[in-house]
Structure formats: C-alpha cells, structure tokens
Image (spheres, grey):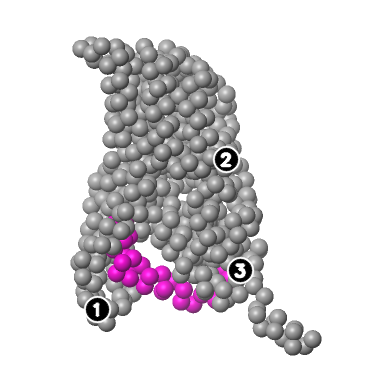
C-alpha cells in the first residue's frame, strides 16, 4: 500500500468515532452506573476503535498498519501497567504490615474534621511536590486519608477530590515530576522558567481550592462523632501492633522517589519491604491468617506472598473497617489494566489513521487572539486525554502541533508549555478511562465521575488559564524579528 493510495480523512471521518464513543460511554454509565468501568466502558472503547479502524481502511490504510498502531499504543502504556501491579502489591503488604492502619490511626488523632478536606489537600500537595509523583502520593498518603475520612464519617467523594487536587498541584510544580519536565521539553522552554510561569495560574487556583475545601469542612452535614473515631482507633489498635516504626516503608519509598529511582522498582521495593515489616512486626496477625495445615514459617510466607498478588482480607466487628482494610494485591489492578489497554487501543487507531490530527486541525480555524490559542490548546489537551486516554500523549501531541503556530503568532513558547500542563496534566484524572483517572479510581475506590466536581484545583486551573489569556494577563510575546532589523537599519 503506497502513500498515494491513502486519502486524507474528512472532518466527518474524524468526528464519527469520537461521537460514537461519547454516546456509548454515556449509555454505559446510564445502564450500569458505578459498574460501568468494570466491562461496559471497555466494550464501548473497543467498538469505537473498530469504527475508527473501518474508517481508516476505507481511506486506504491496511489492517496490518492499523494493528501495528494498536500494538505501539498499548506498548506506551505498559510502564503504567507495571506501576499499577506494583501499587497493588504495595497496598496489600502495607495493610498487612500495619503501615496504612498506622497512618489512619494517627490521622484520626491529629486531623480536625472542620479542616480535614483542606488539610488533606495540603498534605498531598507537600508530599507530591517533594517526590514529583501524584500516583505515589495517592497510593500512600491518599489511601490513608481515605481511611481517616471513613473514620470521621466525611464524604468519600470530597476527600478523593481533595487528594487529587493536592497530588496534582504538587506534581505540577515539582521539578522532579515527569510531566513538568515533559511539557517544557516539547515546547522548547527552560524547566525552571516553565515552573515560575505556571505559578501565575497554579497558585491562585490552589488557594481558591483550599478556601472551598475549608468551607466544605465547616459545612459538613455528616459531623464526625467522637465515639465513632474512638471505636475505629480501638479496633485498629486491637488488630495491629501500631507504632511510628511502621512508617519506615513509607519513608524509604519517598526517599527512593526523591532520589529519582524509576517508579516501578521503587514501588515494588516498598511492597517487598512491607512484606518484611509484616513478618517482623505483625507476626500474630500474619500467622492468624495462615492455614492450620502449615507450619508457622511456611504459613507466614504464604500469607505475605498472597498479599502481594491477591491482597489481604480482615475480619473485625466493623464492616466498614473490613472493607477499608481488605484490599490490595496485583489482582485488584487487573480491571484497571484492562480499561487502559482498551483506551490506548482506541487512541492509537485514531492517531495512526490520521483522524486525531484531522479533528485537531479543525479546532484552529478562526483562532486569532492569544486567548483563542491558549483556550484551543487547553481544549485540545483535554480532548486528547479524552480519546487517547494518556496524559503524556495529551502533552506531546498538542505541543508538537501548536509549537510553530505559537511562534508564528508572536507568542512565547512559555505560553504553550504552561497551557500543555493546564490542559493535559490536570484534566487526566477527571476522565474514568484515562490512565490517571483509572489509577485514581483503583487506589481511592471513588469513581472520577463522583469526585470530578470536588477536584477543585484540577477544574479551576484550566478555566483560570483561559481567563488570563483573554484578559492578556501574563501572556508573554516575542519581539518580532523585523523590529530588530529595522532598529539596526535605523542606526
């Protein structure tokens, strides 16, 4: 098949699979509600992918070419899949070791219900900024805060929104973050200039988010009851040998992240350390879960091994506490990986047969002002997150497409790099089938559709960036080359 035989896709070609996906996703949510991510969404993505493939073949692409695109697309997500598996193991062994229960216990003791949401957001922001990873923050501190929220009878959706807001604020402005390095690299700007320029939209958005979380904390209807908190702390104390020393696996993991060890080995080391801590400090708990047919040492080995691949299950007098602690294991992440593979396949076909590029090119029609360019870049990043299900693609693809356009219009590339983060990084956890949204759902156990309106920072920042652009606030412009030439000629 030669390139001459390949037709340029029409706008209808480009829009049809996206519209079909939106309709099927909406139907899946309507018919299956919270269970839509456990199969229905995957079928919708594969059907939309099939439609995109048919359109591609109509335009001259061979199935072999399309299939290679699917394989390439899936391969891009394998790193995320490995991290997910490691996180599943980490949650399982940290529950068994008492690391997460210890965080919950002391969180219940230290955090005031009136300021809980704002404090949760701030804690996650500090941790994420220190290690440069929203995923690691959510899987460790975020999981513990969800437990504290349950103990205080606070809203799980608002707590998840606070965790996501704080984690992505810290991730966005941390020089250790992958996306914070990726955006300026694609746009051609300096990393620290990029971070400084982002602060103009990031700080006000985060302050507004903290104010809103504070207001929600004061007006929380389900007021925390002292006896409920004391009951959960008592059950945790009876079920585990708690102590600050159980937080060492967390300290080790955060240190490895700060030292820039890749996420997969760092998280898996944390999971293995959790298994060791379980045997050393929770021997009675571990052996109580072992089979009576095995010796103590063999039984303990099997319990820890099971925690790594299938999580743990606790039985206390409190069913809510049981559901909170009984989780983890690689198997708990398999549905999320299924969703990611289907989503990446759909996005890969759109990109390989030129439908995504055609759809995005239509967005630029009529763009004249800086506000138009920034708003359409952010919209493109969000749309790319929606259809390709990957935040890295949502930064790289619009960045490549708009780089020259920003330059032609006399706009500094810092405007582009900031817009890529405002629209790409921040909207990714708001989409259930995006790798980030699926990940947050897996570790926080709250659907992005439930926390989307409470992830204040992630929603406010892109809107504020567009407002800034149209008002001309902090929009950097390049001095046109001809001005310099004329000045030299005048001299």
State the residue position of label 2. Answer: 130
Residue 34 visible? The answer is yes
In the rendered structure, which disc, 2 or 1, sits on the residue that comes first in sequence?
1
Q: CA distance from mark 1 to mark 3?
A: 39 Å
- Alpha-carbon neighbours of circle 2 within 10 Å: few (<14), some, or many (≥20)? many
**Which region shows up in magenta?**
344-372
Residue 431 rendering spot, x and y as whole percentages:
39, 51
User: Judging from the image, what secondary structure is the residue with disc 3 in?
Assistant: loop
Nearest the eye: 470 or 336: 336
The percent position of residue 251, horizontal first and vertical second, equals 52, 30
Q: Residue at x 35, y 22 (%)?
A: 322
Q: Is residue 415 left or right of residue 300?
A: right
Q: In terms of image quadrants, where is residue 410?
A: bottom right
Q: Callout 1: helix, strand or loop?
A: loop
Q: How many marks?
A: 3
Look at discs 1 and 3 and give the one toward the viewer: 1
- Across and down, in percent, residue 288 comes to 31, 13
Which residue is painted at 29% across and 48% down in the image? 339
Q: Quadrant of residue 58?
A: bottom left
Q: Earlier in the sequence, mark 2 or mark 3?
A: 2
- The residue singled out by tag 3 in the image is 412
| Residue for point 53% across, 35% down | 255
What secondary structure is found at the residue carrying circle 2? helix
């Amino acid at each position: 098949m030669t390139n001459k035989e390949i037709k340029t896709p029409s706008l209808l070609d480009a829009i049809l699979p996206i519209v079909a996906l939106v309709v099927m996703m909406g139907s899946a949510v309507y018919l299956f509600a919270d269970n839509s991510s456990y199969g229905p969404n995957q079928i919708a993505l594969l059907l939309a992918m099939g439609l995109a493939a048919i359109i591609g073949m109509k335009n001259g692409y061979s199935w072999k070419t399309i299939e290679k695109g699917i394989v390439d697309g899936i391969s891009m997500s394998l790193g995320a899949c490995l991290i997910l598996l490691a996180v599943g193991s980490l949650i399982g062994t940290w529950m068994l070791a008492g690391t997460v229960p210890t965080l919950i216990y002391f969180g219940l003791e230290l955090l005031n219900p009136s300021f809980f949401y704002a404090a949760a957001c701030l804690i996650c922001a500090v941790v994420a900024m220190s290690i440069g990873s929203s995923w690691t923050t959510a899987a460790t501190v975020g999981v513990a805060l969800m437990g504290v929220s349950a103990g205080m009878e606070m809203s799980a959706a608002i707590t998840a929104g606070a965790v996501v807001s704080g984690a992505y604020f810290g991730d966005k402005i941390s020089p250790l973050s992958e996306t914070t390095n990726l955006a300026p690299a694609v746009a051609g700007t300096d990393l620290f200039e990029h971070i400084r320029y982002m602060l103009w939209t990031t700080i006000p958005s985060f302050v507004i988010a903290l104010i809103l979380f504070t207001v929600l904390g004061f007006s929380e209807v389900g007021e925390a009851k002292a006896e409920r908190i004391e009951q959960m702390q008592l059950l945790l104390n009876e079920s585990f040998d708690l102590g600050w020393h159980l937080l060492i696996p967390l300290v080790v993991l955060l240190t490895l992240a700060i030292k820039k060890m890749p996420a997969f080995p760092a998280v898996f080391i944390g999971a293995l350390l959790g298994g060791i801590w379980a045997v050393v400090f929770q021997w009675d708990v571990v052996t109580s879960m072992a089979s009576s047919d095995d010796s103590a040492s063999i039984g303990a080995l099997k319990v820890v091994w099971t925690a790594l691949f299938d999580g743990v299950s606790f039985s206390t007098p409190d069913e809510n506490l049981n559901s909170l602690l009984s989780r983890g294991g690689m198997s708990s992440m398999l549905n999320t990986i299924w969703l990611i593979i289907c989503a990446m396949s759909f996005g890969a076909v759109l990109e390989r047969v030129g439908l995504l590029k055609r759809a995005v090119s239509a967005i630029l029609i009529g763009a004249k002002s800086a506000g138009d360019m920034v708003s359409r870049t952010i919209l493109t990043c969000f749309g790319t997150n929606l259809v390709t299900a990957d935040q890295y693609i949502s930064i790289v693809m619009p960045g490549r497409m708009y780089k020259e356009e920003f330059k032609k219009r006399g706009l500094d590339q810092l405007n582009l790099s900031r817009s890529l983060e405002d629209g790409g990084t921040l909207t990714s956890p708001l989409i259930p089938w995006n790798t980030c949204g699926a990940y947050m759902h897996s570790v926080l156990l709250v659907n992005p559709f439930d926390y989307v309106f409470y992830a204040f920072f992630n929603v406010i920042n892109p809107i504020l960036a567009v407002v800034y652009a149209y008002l001309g606030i902090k929009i950097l412009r390049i001095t046109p080359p001809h001005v310099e030439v004329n000045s030299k000629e005048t001299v």
